[in-house]
Image (spheres, coloured by chain):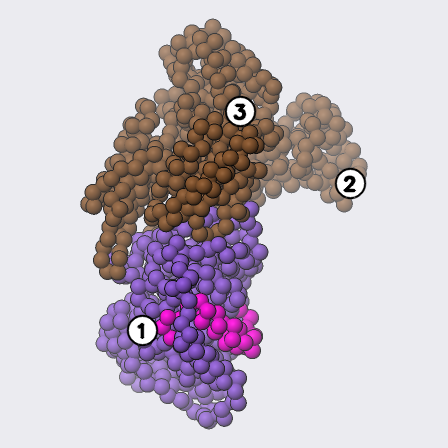
Chain colours: A brown, B purple
């Protein structure tokens, strides 16, 4: 009866898929028109909808690289960044953008104000932004997740000068001032462009007669509502890889440690699953080599893909890292990795004769045979991929742990399966399977795995709750909750409260989906007197897939 | 964006599930606010700074350093093995070139743990620096190593372990033993007969401020280090000289600790004591990390930093000047003629109290006077919890005489049967009977 739409607006293609409880109803792939994204979205949707009654669509999930591209192409807005940090690392080192201001004020790790915010300096900063015509602001203060009052004061003073103000404490409950500054900056920088797009998508979708709720995929494989995304567009940045990873988890039942490779023309994205769940970046992804607090699935990208150029350098074959159009089999004019796979008999893609010409030219240069050159190129590529996977797993197994129990009992990741998606997936599967010595699967629907992932990802949310029984205060920064508690407030009270806050903020979630990620309580001593407890709970609605749809798509794995 | 001048590896292990007892200062949240501060400052994101997981020390790592009575397992917990393993990890990062410098921010501490261990004293069971240093020597070759202990309490455990070792320079800067636990660490205590002047004690008067610490670093520590020419410098980075520390009487600041570390320029720093967990540790640890990474720490201050109150009294400065002069005279002045005959034993009698575990120990320690090596060591010990034990150590690089005599004494002790426990460390042949 009900169906869901997944839509992935990528840099090259816009993919859409319509999934019902009986399986994939239809899918489409259109070229992304960067100047008219709305049109790309509409044509992809028209193609999959066909004659389907729009009322049967229960949800639409959107994933996009729009925000990422805006940053790359420097189409983002100029942002007035106002920071207050108090003593510590000089905040001048965290400068981002061309309108960066530091004002006096200090809050400590307990959330106590140590020095009031300097209102005069703040007003001067705003005046300077006003002169430059700036209408987008980002404000961040040290330990604002423990006490947001300085950020709130900044917001109220900037208010009438701004179209958007991003306050750091609303983006994440996590500590890390430089990341908070960067995240707030990026959010305000892409706010206008995302909202123009969002407005157009909403218009277009209603034009097609669709009234289903729209969700936007986040980089951590969860979703947010369309309305929420308009305030925090930064969370949609880099949701592309998340769509692919959730897609493969939808197509194939992954219940243990596994490696997922998404091989494209230019690059290969690597993801690792531990006990069936994709790994998450500890603190957040980096954009333009600036670390942020945007939670994200952990992916590594290496410059090896089907179109990586092959060259001869002192008698040896080199692979990539660059690409110069498609491989020769697809009409290009330089031999690339896919041409080598053609010659080695791993695939028969496009114009095999053209591949033969390109590789034998290389063989001539190297004074060797085409077969040897092809074999050597494939070995190089496979080695690069296996080395990158190994270092990603080693790094994860080396991650710091903070309790004796975890350190002695934590499980190490030992992958037992390999999944490959992307254009050249089949061509690579035999060599990679051999190199990894793992059971290897290329799911049948791998071409639209990203859109399937978007369609079937369920709504998620995570919050951090802090309770300080000495100060008798409870904080949930993500939800701007600040309330007083009694001196006997316990860890169990905090767990329950976190669960209730989560369930109240996400539709259709039930208690079984709530996961306590971290829970700790520390007695605070003043001398030998117990002054109170410091309680911390981090809970989330687990990122995951809609179980009711999975049976239908799993047959394609 | 910040970029570290020195690649710094930080081994952070707060042991959030371990405490000596529920209200003891060496407790679960001791590094909680430090973690908050380091995270909020974004220290682990700075290019060139990396965070690492500790190793777990193996029983052999402990038995090549300590005589544990009755055995290693009985006097340690998993947490001690991880804390020592954290120090070992820090050393491995530096020795194997993964980092230029390393900071082991681990607990529980170790610098009050002596050669013989019957239990826990001064919150310490095993000496994590010594376990680390001997791990280095076992795996990366014999090295000249200097330890500079900047904890407010005298590093009596480390002093005891290296008292006879001419290849280890131990310098302890601490609040005068007449005014603070453990009540030792006087200028005259300067090493055993085979290791004269390889122990340097710098007792400072209460109320010493940044100025005084920097004065002894510049005038005493650096010249002695330059003379010793170590391959490796280790800082036992206790943080209880801080003006907010509840159990000491000094007036050192985070800025001062950072400057001290910058001047000392150690390869490895290991956290020791420091129990002002909210007012000091977050800022001092951040300062040490920035200084080790070669980063600007000039804006780092405690929120309640008061330059007027933290100015050093003139009488304190004068006292420090006298102490410095006396140490320099003792170290650089004319050498005392050798008082002991090579090949004979020199004896020390010691009464040791384990304040944390309430144990009293009596020991008689004999060292062979030797011109060719660190000298054979024999310790006869008994305590309120253990029957008499004899402990024999053949040092690293031992000469034939000291090695053969050690083996002979071991066999004799086995035949006699006078001792309930017989412990043997033979560093030359890597044989340990724990």
Asked if residue B134 can be seen in this view, the reply is no
**What's the mark number on residue A193?**
3
**What's the mark number on residue B200?**
none
Q: Residues within 10 Å of mark 3 (few under 14, many from 20)?
A: some
Looking at the image, tell me whether mark 2 or mark 3 is earlier in sequence order: 3
The magenta-colored residue range is B205-232
Foreground of the two, A392 or A172: A172
Main structural element of the magenta stretch: helix, strand or loop? helix
Chain of the residue that carries numbered disc 2 in the rendered image: A
Give the CA separation, mark 3 to mark 1: 65 Å
Residue A533: x percent and y percent?
A: 26, 49
Label 3: which secondary element: helix
Q: Residues within 10 Å of mark 2 (few under 14, many from 20)?
A: some
Residue B226 falls inside the magenta stretch: yes
Q: Residue at x 41, y 51 (%)?
A: B37
Badge nearest the viewer, 2 or 1: 1
Q: Which residue is mark 2?
A: A366
For the residues labelled 2 and 3, say whether their Cβ atoms are less than 8 Å apart. Answer: no
Residue B8: x percent and y percent?
A: 52, 56
**What's the mark number on residue B181?**
1
Residue B115: x percent and y percent?
A: 37, 75
Label 1: which secondary element: loop
Dividing the picture into quarters, in which one does residue B29 lie? bottom left
Give the CA separation, mark 2 to mark 1: 75 Å
Q: Residues within 10 Å of mark 1 (few under 14, many from 20)?
A: some
Residue B147 falls inside the magenta stretch: no
């Amino acid at each position: 009866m009900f169906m869901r739409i997944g839509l992935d607006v990528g840099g090259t293609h816009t993919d859409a898929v319509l999934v019902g409880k009986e399986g994939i109803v239809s899918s489409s792939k259109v070229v992304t028109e960067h100047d008219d994204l709305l049109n790309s979205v509409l044509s992809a949707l028209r193609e999959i909808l066909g004659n389907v009654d729009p009322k049967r669509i229960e949800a639409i999930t959107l994933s996009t690289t729009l925000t990422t591209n805006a940053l790359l192409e420097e189409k983002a807005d100029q942002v007035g960044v106002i920071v207050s940090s108090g003593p510590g690392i000089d905040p001048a080192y965290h400068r981002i953008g061309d309108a960066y201001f530091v004002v006096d004020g200090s809050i400590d790790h307990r959330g106590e104000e140590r020095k009031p915010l300097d209102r005069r300096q703040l007003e001067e900063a705003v005046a300077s932004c006003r002169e430059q015509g700036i209408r987008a602001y980002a404000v961040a203060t040290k330990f604002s997740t423990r006490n947001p009052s300085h950020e709130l004061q900044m917001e109220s003073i900037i208010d009438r000068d701004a179209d958007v103000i991003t306050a750091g404490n609303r983006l994440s409950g996590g500590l890390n001032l430089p990341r908070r500054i960067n995240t707030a900056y990026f959010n305000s920088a892409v706010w206008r462009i995302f909202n123009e797009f969002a407005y157009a998508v909403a218009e277009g979708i209603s034009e097609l007669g669709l009234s289903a709720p729209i969700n936007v995929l986040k980089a951590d494989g969860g979703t947010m509502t369309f309305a929420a995304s308009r305030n925090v567009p930064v969370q949609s940045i880099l949701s592309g890889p998340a769509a692919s990873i959730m897609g493969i988890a939808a197509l194939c039942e992954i219940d243990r440690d596994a490696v997922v490779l998404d091989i494209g023309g230019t690059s290969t994205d690597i993801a690792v699953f531990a006990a069936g769940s994709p790994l998450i970046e500890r603190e957040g992804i980096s954009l333009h080599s600036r670390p942020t607090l945007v939670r994200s699935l952990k992916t590594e990208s290496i410059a090896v893909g089907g179109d990586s150029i092959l060259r001869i350098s002192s008698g040896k074959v080199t692979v990539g890292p660059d690409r110069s159009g498609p491989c020769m089999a697809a009409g290009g004019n330089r031999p690339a990795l896919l041409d080598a796979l053609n010659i080695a008999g791993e695939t028969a893609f496009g114009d095999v004769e053209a591949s033969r010409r390109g590789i034998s030219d290389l063989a001539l240069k190297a004074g060797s045979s085409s077969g040897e050159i092809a074999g050597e190129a494939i070995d190089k590529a496979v080695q690069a991929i296996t080395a990158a996977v190994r270092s990603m797993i080693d790094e994860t197994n080396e991650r710091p742990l903070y309790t004796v129990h975890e350190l002695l009992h934590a499980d190490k990741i030992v992958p037992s399966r390999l999944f490959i998606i992307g254009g050249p997936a089949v061509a690579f599967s035999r060599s990679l399977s051999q190199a990894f010595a793992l059971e290897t699967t290329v799911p049948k629907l791998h071409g639209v795995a990203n859109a399937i992932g978007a369609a079937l990802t369920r709504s998620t949310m995570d919050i951090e709750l802090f309770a300080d029984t000495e100060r008798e205060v409870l904080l949930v920064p993500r939800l701007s909750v600040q309330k007083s508690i009694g001196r006997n407030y316990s860890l169990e009270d905090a767990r329950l409260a976190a669960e209730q806050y989560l369930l109240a903020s996400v539709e259709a979630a039930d208690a079984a989906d709530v996961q306590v990620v971290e829970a700790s309580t520390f007695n605070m001593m003043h001398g030998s007197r117990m002054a109170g407890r410091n309680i911390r709970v981090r809970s989330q609605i687990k990122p995951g897939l809609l179980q009711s749809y999975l049976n239908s798509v799993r047959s394609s794995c | 964006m910040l970029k570290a001048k020195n690649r710094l590896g930080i081994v952070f292990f707060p042991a959030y599930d371990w405490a000596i007892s529920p209200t003891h200062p060496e407790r679960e949240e001791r590094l909680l606010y430090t973690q908050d501060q380091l995270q909020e400052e974004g220290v682990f994101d700075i290019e060139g700074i990396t965070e690492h997981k500790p190793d777990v020390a193996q029983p052999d790592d402990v038995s090549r350093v300590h005589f544990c009575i009755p055995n290693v397992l009985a006097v340690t917990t998993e947490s001690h093995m991880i804390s020592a393993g954290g120090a070992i990890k820090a050393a491995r990062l530096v020795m194997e070139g993964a980092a230029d410098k390393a900071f082991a921010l681990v607990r529980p501490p170790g610098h009050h743990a002596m050669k013989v261990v019957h239990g826990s004293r001064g919150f310490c069971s095993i000496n994590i620096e010594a376990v680390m240093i001997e791990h280095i020597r076992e795996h990366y070759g014999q090295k000249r190593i200097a330890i500079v202990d900047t904890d407010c309490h005298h590093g009596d455990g480390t002093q005891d372990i290296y008292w006879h070792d001419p290849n280890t320079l131990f310098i302890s800067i601490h609040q005068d033993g007449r005014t603070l636990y453990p009540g030792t660490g006087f200028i005259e205590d300067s090493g055993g007969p085979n290791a004269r002047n390889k122990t340097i004690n710098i007792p400072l008067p209460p109320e010493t401020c940044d100025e005084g610490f920097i004065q002894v670093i510049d005038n005493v520590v650096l010249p002695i280090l330059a003379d010793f020419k170590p391959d490796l410098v280790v800082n036992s980075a206790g943080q209880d000289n801080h003006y907010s520390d509840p159990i000491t009487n000094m007036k050192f600041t985070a800025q001062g600790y950072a400057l001290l570390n910058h001047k000392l320029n150690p390869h490895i720093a290991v956290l020791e004591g420091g129990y002002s967990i909210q007012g000091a540790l977050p800022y001092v640890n951040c300062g040490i990390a920035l200084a080790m990474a070669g980063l600007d720490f000039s804006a780092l201050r405690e929120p309640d930093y008061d330059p007027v109150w933290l100015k050093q009294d003139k009488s304190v400065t004068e006292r420090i000047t006298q102490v410095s002069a006396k140490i320099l005279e003792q170290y650089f002045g004319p050498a005392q003629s050798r008082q002991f005959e090579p090949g004979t034993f020199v004896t020390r009698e010691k009464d040791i109290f384990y304040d944390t575990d309430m144990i009293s120990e009596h020991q008689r320690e004999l060292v062979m006077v030797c011109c060719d090596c660190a000298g054979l060591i024999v310790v006869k010990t008994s305590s309120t919890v253990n029957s008499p034990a004899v402990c024999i150590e053949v040092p690293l690089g031992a000469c034939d005489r000291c090695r053969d005599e050690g083996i002979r004494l071991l066999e004799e002790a086995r035949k006699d049967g006078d001792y309930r426990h017989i412990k043997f460390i033979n560093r030359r042949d890597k044989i340990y009977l724990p």
